Image: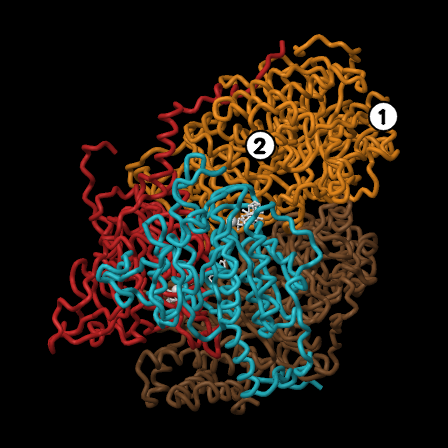
Chain colours: A orange, B brown, C red, D cyan
Amino acid sequence: MATSTPTKPITSIEEATIRFCGDSGDGMQLAGTQFTNTSALLGNDVATFPDFPAEIRAPRGTKAGVSGFQIHFSSHEIFTPGDTVDALVAMNPAALTTNVTDLRDGGILIVNKNAFDKKGMEQAGYASNPLEDDSLAKYKLHSVEMTKITRLAVEDCGLTQKEADRCRNFFAMGLVFWLYDRSLDPTLRFIEKKFGAKFPAVAQANTKALKAGYHYGETVEAINTQYQVAPAKLPPGQYRNIMGNIALAWGLLTAAQKSNKQLFLGAYPITPASDVLHELSKHKHFDVLTFQAEDEIAAMTSTIGAAFAGAMSVTASSGPGIALKGEGLGLAVITELPMVVVNVQRGGPSTGLPTKTEQSDLLQAMYGRNGECPMPVIAASSPGDCFDVALEAWRLAVRYMTPVMLLTDGYIANGSEPWRIPEVADIPKIPVEHPGPSSNGDAFQPYERDERLSRPWAIPGTTGLEHRLGGLEKQDVSGNVCYDPDNHDHMCRLRAEKVARIANDIPPQELDGPDSGDLLVLSWGGPYGACATAVHRAQADGKNVSHCQLRYLNPFPKNLAEIFTRFDKVLIPELNLGQLSRIIRAEFKIDTISLNKVTGKPFSVAEILEKIEELA
Amino acid sequence: MATSTPTKPITSIEEATIRFCGDSGDGMQLAGTQFTNTSALLGNDVATFPDFPAEIRAPRGTKAGVSGFQIHFSSHEIFTPGDTVDALVAMNPAALTTNVTDLRDGGILIVNKNAFDKKGMEQAGYASNPLEDDSLAKYKLHSVEMTKITRLAVEDCGLTQKEADRCRNFFAMGLVFWLYDRSLDPTLRFIEKKFGAKFPAVAQANTKALKAGYHYGETVEAINTQYQVAPAKLPPGQYRNIMGNIALAWGLLTAAQKSNKQLFLGAYPITPASDVLHELSKHKHFDVLTFQAEDEIAAMTSTIGAAFAGAMSVTASSGPGIALKGEGLGLAVITELPMVVVNVQRGGPSTGLPTKTEQSDLLQAMYGRNGECPMPVIAASSPGDCFDVALEAWRLAVRYMTPVMLLTDGYIANGSEPWRIPEVADIPKIPVEHPGPSSNGDAFQPYERDERLSRPWAIPGTTGLEHRLGGLEKQDVSGNVCYDPDNHDHMCRLRAEKVARIANDIPPQELDGPDSGDLLVLSWGGPYGACATAVHRAQADGKNVSHCQLRYLNPFPKNLAEIFTRFDKVLIPELNLGQLSRIIRAEFKIDTISLNKVTGKPFSVAEILEKIEELA
Amino acid sequence: MSIDTPLPVLKPADFASDQDVRWCPGCGDYSILAQMKKVMPTLGVPRENIVFISGIGCSSRFPYYMNTYGMHSIHGRAPAVATGLKTCRPDLMVWVITGDGDGLSIGGNHLMHCIRRNMDLNIVLFNNRIYGLTKGQYSPTSPLGKVTKSTPMGAIDNPLHPLSLAIGCEATFVARSIDTNVKHLASTLKRASEHHGTSFIEVYQNCNIFNDGAWAYAKDRETKLDTTIELEHGKPLIFGKNRDKGIRLNGLEPEVVELGKGITEDDLLFHNEKSPEPSLAYLLSRMRFEDGFPEPIGVFRSVDAPRYDEMINDQVKQATKEKGKGDLEALFNTGETWTVK
Amino acid sequence: MSIDTPLPVLKPADFASDQDVRWCPGCGDYSILAQMKKVMPTLGVPRENIVFISGIGCSSRFPYYMNTYGMHSIHGRAPAVATGLKTCRPDLMVWVITGDGDGLSIGGNHLMHCIRRNMDLNIVLFNNRIYGLTKGQYSPTSPLGKVTKSTPMGAIDNPLHPLSLAIGCEATFVARSIDTNVKHLASTLKRASEHHGTSFIEVYQNCNIFNDGAWAYAKDRETKLDTTIELEHGKPLIFGKNRDKGIRLNGLEPEVVELGKGITEDDLLFHNEKSPEPSLAYLLSRMRFEDGFPEPIGVFRSVDAPRYDEMINDQVKQATKEKGKGDLEALFNTGETWTVK
Ligand SMILES: Cc1ncc(C[n+]2csc(CCOP(=O)(O)OP(=O)(O)O)c2C)c(N)n1
Ligand SMILES: Cc1ncc(C[n+]2csc(CCOP(=O)(O)OP(=O)(O)O)c2C)c(N)n1
Ligand code: SF4
Ligand code: SF4
Ligand SMILES: [Mg+2]
Ligand SMILES: [Mg+2]
């Protein structure tokens, strides 16, 4: 599908990892997204890692303002955005200095030469021009006058110079598209859709810049090889690329439809969870009510109100916001109303590293409430998995009349991967029952339980079921306020038992690899991809190692204890200081080996592999 | 010191447990307090357990409105308010029915016969008059016309009938004072002080009622024995009786003086923590500022502001309030400012059982915050211990520049015991250093650390030390905002290590009993007394059992791991569903046996003993 | 319930739940409960469509005593809980019961935002100027100098005026009544129920245990006609046992004047609860007994304005009209997709 | 610092910290920062006695850029942090920097209580009618219908008016200024610093990334003299490019009139920032451009009243005077004690 017949030799490779980086204003996220979509459309498996600067836009050209987007694309199944980069595009000196260390030796380095002026280099801390001294000798350096060429290319579109310069990212895209033999068509369609009607001049300019980049690759001699990455053999089906937060939002929408419910989201903006609010607020025609609350406490308690109302009720936030919801969660637990609480984890403690990823809210999810206050906790493993986990969270919530904590993290939330679009009809319904009107005059018993220990979800408007919920201890069965000592003990144990019994209702833990062996790698959340890849490699190397990725963190799958008995060692890699380890040790009384990292970055495959090799 | 020569036989006994119970309006708390003080003055060891009805005053005469006060007094050292009651005073049918089951067979039962009218018995659910049917046969029942006699006794004091009836508790006191051969003098002094000047008629009436009760005992034939409990052999010194919340407040006052600091308390009222606010607000002349905040979040964050200001800064609350402080605590941890956070635990989850005791906030104390957010946690064991623990909390806070979580519970907070008044001069100073003004123009490094990993506490107003704190990750040493990945990892580990190193600075764990054996009873907080007593009894029975009471819950004393190796089994009794157990298992990878109870009531000695006997 | 089934005729007693009422004998809350039960059957709303949401406090026990749906939530959060409920279920009639501590101290932010969004809720704030449930600490409405358990030397927090605050937050319906003024209270509750949007009612309530007599001046038979003034829409502000005193405006300052002696009703300030701008309502909310004014009771302000709960549901309808009912299949296939065979 | 050491003469640049300023180029925050640095040296307060406390938001990065003591606390809590600080250290000059989201959304309750307590703090609220830091959701001051990331069909929350709210919370000092009106801004900051008690200043601030032009009408050279009106104590309310328009009261309703044609200055509303009752200030806070009024800038209200931080410290002094400095020995021995030998 390339736009012209290649005139240079093409090397076929299995996979590649590239990264666009530049100033926040340079449109690197857009470039990355376009490359991703194009590669996905071409049939590659892809995994991405957008890396935003800290919250505030720093002055242009500073290191603090550098924004990056990494894409790993492959002709086989992949699970991570790649450890090291094969080709790096750096739009300015600050981007170069902060990113070049991730480029592998011999990798392709494309830089915008025009940005290496005195001020730019000063801001990046370069004493001499790295494009001219020898410091980049170990890379295949292509120093391109991107600004100049782009200006020339768009000359006759009638743009201001500032506007013209904004087309630079399309030039860079064009060049990289040529390099990896990708079609321009999807991007051309994108330009047309986004700018065509409203800003025809911009559309024209971007098109020209894109093509200029492509032709630059074709023409310029210094760049002498093109690469090709063949389509991957993915399970058959219709595919699209999807980001974690979007998949999560769509999963929630689907859960609502599958349970015939209106969807209520009570949320307060917070990075990196805000996109769930943004996405759902676009889909009001799915019978969605999004309430931007005054704070997280109102978000949480409005969610309780909506659950009482009978809606599928959800709140979404990140660490500090979840901390504020702790008291409200206690009310959700004791009123036994169904709802989903999403935590898109970020770097803590406190405000911490708000745009970076971390898995350090697991213990808060388990224990961050007063009293004996048990709650199911489940976690997504990848962007696409967010969809499934959202459905599962609501299934459990409504089946067990309980709030469910759903953990994702910044890495999953902002990352993307190809997603096989499910057949809507194949997605199982989520049955919800509300007791109907009663006219026999008997007092309704809101805390009577079924075999799952679940109580009835009676909603206002139903004749004869009038009842009062609240945060004081409830009498068993009647739900009246009750100070009886034994009743309290009974109810505390009952709430715990109800959550524990969910273990009967979830699939047994799957194991990737042999049933027993030297080492079990146990992971949850974002590190899934790095662990899966590392374990596969170690297995290929003949190591006796298997992998379990946990979706269910409370309760754990029933067969987990038994799995542990079959391995000599258990390695738990986590982006925290050992939180799952603590829980596993307490629960199963086994020894665990922790691999911890809290740098705000995901694990690389190499980090996991190294540890595996040390242990098995 | 009895007011008259006894005319009936006196039996000497080792110890006794009595309970006053009646309607909330019957003055039972006062009766209990007077009996306690009198017994303490006489030299007995005492332990008390006031039991309030749920928050709201229920209509008179209902079971929901019953209030009780139990006193255990003894001629030897005791640790609990007693499991069963030797003498029960019940002022009305509701009090009788809700309390009589705790009276031991053969125990003395004194009831106000006049309260057993139709309405009263109906409210208590008595079909027939229990004073007249045989249902109380197993007790020594004294059915006294208290209302009538009291009215007669105070006849000429010029009170209304309602006022006269309010003297009934003094009649009951007088009778019980006689029964246990206690002096009336302390109570007479109390009456004089409380009512003498302002309400002479009331003072006179109460005096008459008190004496009437005493003389009733002397005179009436049915009551034929008096008991005597000799003074206990307590360590020499000056003593007073003290409640946990008061001891805590005084400990804080003392810590402030010993560190030459102003004391700031930011608090929002909540049962059972409000008394800390009440008590401290009485002592402004100790340079105490008490701020009743608009909510717990403001209480917490004003406490942070006060810590920044350089004050000894404290906040106190209970479970739901602590849940609200979670986000603020993260800021306290990352700014590394010293402060004390008190949680007087109560029954949860949510509003739960607000006036009852529980130990179910330990996991919240440890983990109830987003991110890796470590904080030292210590717990008081008894009312008097609150004083020492308050001092220790501040010592650690200021020495390690960290918020410290101090746990007590409703049982300790409202219970009382004799307290040996410390020599103020003997209490060690708590040294605090603030770096002085600097004029060398070098940038101040607020995150430079000493050998304890503690940073300097530089306070506003100091020339040359201007610096900015905040919730974003800090650069090591400089304290500037820093997004560097490795710095974040480093700082997370550093904060954890700083807290962990406190283990070097606390006394090794003490053991009550032999160094090794079949069973170690490991307890923390309120169950101390029941565990100590039960272990002593088991030891006396020849059991191979020892007891550790933990004050330090994070970090644990260094020698704890080693202690565990010397016992076959570890029993952890807790008023929760096994929270310390979870932590111990995770930390030490040992097996533990949990004894859990969440009835809102403390453990009885018998419950612990039974479990010990089962295990050793 | 189909439209032509006649509503069963209910009596106040039908709104009593089976729970024992556990306020202190003599508490002003009893009277408010009684009036609420009296008003309920007159509203034409089936019992199952009524919900009471409260926070924590003595006052907040209220829902337990009403045989409707209800939730005794957590301290200060009732307006937020009610917001979630009402947003999803605009068909329900939702009452929020709160106290001066619950609503104005810990819950101030939710109250403020609920009012400015003009959620269609009826908020009744029981103002006893004290924390009852926690046994007597001062509240945001306690006067300066008030000695309480937490202020042994007297309170030093300048008190809030609930109605001024509500008006400062763009309230569309603001009223005041008194626990013991039963007729007035009942009619005020009824007026509130009829308003579309947030109705905010302050009720002077006596806590006879921890703050007895806080409103004595406004409740006492002897003084109340001189210390309070009943607002009536379109009528001049007249008060006094003999209805011989009135309120006149002097620029922007109200003043008490005596009628007769050359001053007629026409010189007085006329009440206009419908005034689009809230300055009049604000000014009335500033009249305080301690400054020599009678305190207004009744409806200060009642204006129509768009409601959040209605608008959010309208957006759903509009979006559905424009885009059709949400189709997952279509959603999943928006943007670029590809087929793997 | 002893009383006779003369203060070193500082320049605005001395108040710049060594941190890079990280707002978007063109952000209105720069201008506010510049004016703050300019005002600082004129206050006669040593740099080390000045503290800036903020919450979270673009605006809340402010303390990092001031070479004073400071804390960038957590979202919405700056007034509470500052309350703890100022209570213990009334000797410090404390500024609170907040945004329309930080101060009015999550932090509304603390703002409200801080103002009513009249804590001696200077609160500057940067109102850009948007959430800047989280990239463009609507805020409590965004107008109805505003399309943002979280309101693709337009906002349906009726906006708050920060000054009306503050006045509803018993504010003693209330002012408004505009980021680009640098002289006015500087003098307003200075006025605020001189007030004893809570000074609340709303600054119209442009977020050129997510809400560019929100205040265009009030900032534009062409229109600003017609769309804003500068308040001066004791002066009539006159505005317009030719100073030919004024505000007159019609009962309690303000109206825009043209001077001349029989209307003189004396017919106009005269500003009185010292009015004990806040109704005038409230009324002024209701004048909105969208309703055809010029929006007042300057000091709406400035009255003296007791301050919490002062009173709480007075209580300590008084208690110490009455009871003597706290004596632990004596305290421990109050009530009944006994000796064990
Ligand atoms: C988070 C939290 N903080 C504190 C409390 C304790 N508390 C319960 S009610 C109350 C104040 C009640 O005052 P008010 O709202 O005036 O109600 P009243 O009892 O006077 O009717 C407080 C502080 C609580 N239950 N939860
Ligand atoms: C508890 C918590 N919730 C949410 C956030 C995310 N957050 C940071 S700033 C902000 C809003 C900022 O808006 P505003 O106060 O108007 O400041 P601006 O950026 O516009 O100056 C939000 C929602 C947070 N940091 N903490
Ligand atoms: S404490 Fe006061 S408000 Fe509470 S029930 Fe008793 S009288 Fe009523
Ligand atoms: S996002 Fe807006 S408010 Fe924030 S720095 Fe940029 S321009 Fe300023
Ligand atoms: Mg109250
Ligand atoms: Mg803003």
Kindly check if marks 1 and 2 are in contact, taking CB atoms under 8 A apart as contact.
no
At x 60% / y 45%, what residue is drawn? D24
**Above/below status of C3 relative to A3:** below
1 and 2 marks on the same chain: yes
Quadrant of residue D51 in the image?
bottom right
> Residue at horizontal 33%, vertical 72%?
C214
Position of B214 with respect to A604 (left or right) is left
Does B423 sit above or below residue C156? Answer: below
Amino acid tagged 1:
Gly
Q: Is residue A461 visible?
A: yes
Q: Classify mark 2: residues with Cα within 10 Å, few (<14), some (14-19) or many (20+).
A: few
Q: Earlier in the sequence, mark 1 or mark 2?
A: 1
State which quadrant residue B283 falls in.
Answer: bottom right
Dot 2 falls on a residue whose secondary structure is loop
Q: Residue drawn at (57%, 29%), measured in percent from left and top?
A: A159
Which residue matches tag 1? A106
Quick one: B394 or D275, which is closer to the camera?
D275
Q: Position of residue A191 (x, y in %)?
A: 56, 22
Above or below B67: residue D4: below
Disc 1, SS: strand
Which of the two residues, A195 or B152, is positioned nearer the viewer here? A195
Residue closest to the eye, A455 or B321: B321
Question: Callout 2, which amino acid?
Answer: Thr
Q: In which chain is the residue bearing label 1? A: A
- Which residue in the protein does label 2 denote? A160
Q: CB at mark 1 closer than 8 A to ligand 4?
A: no
Whether residue A371 is visible to the viewer of this picture, yes or no, is no
Nearest the camera: B227 or A604?
A: A604
Count of marks, rendered view: 2
CA gap, disc 1 and disc 2: 38 Å
- The answer for which chain carries disc 2 is A
Location of the C terminus of chain A (image quadrant): top right
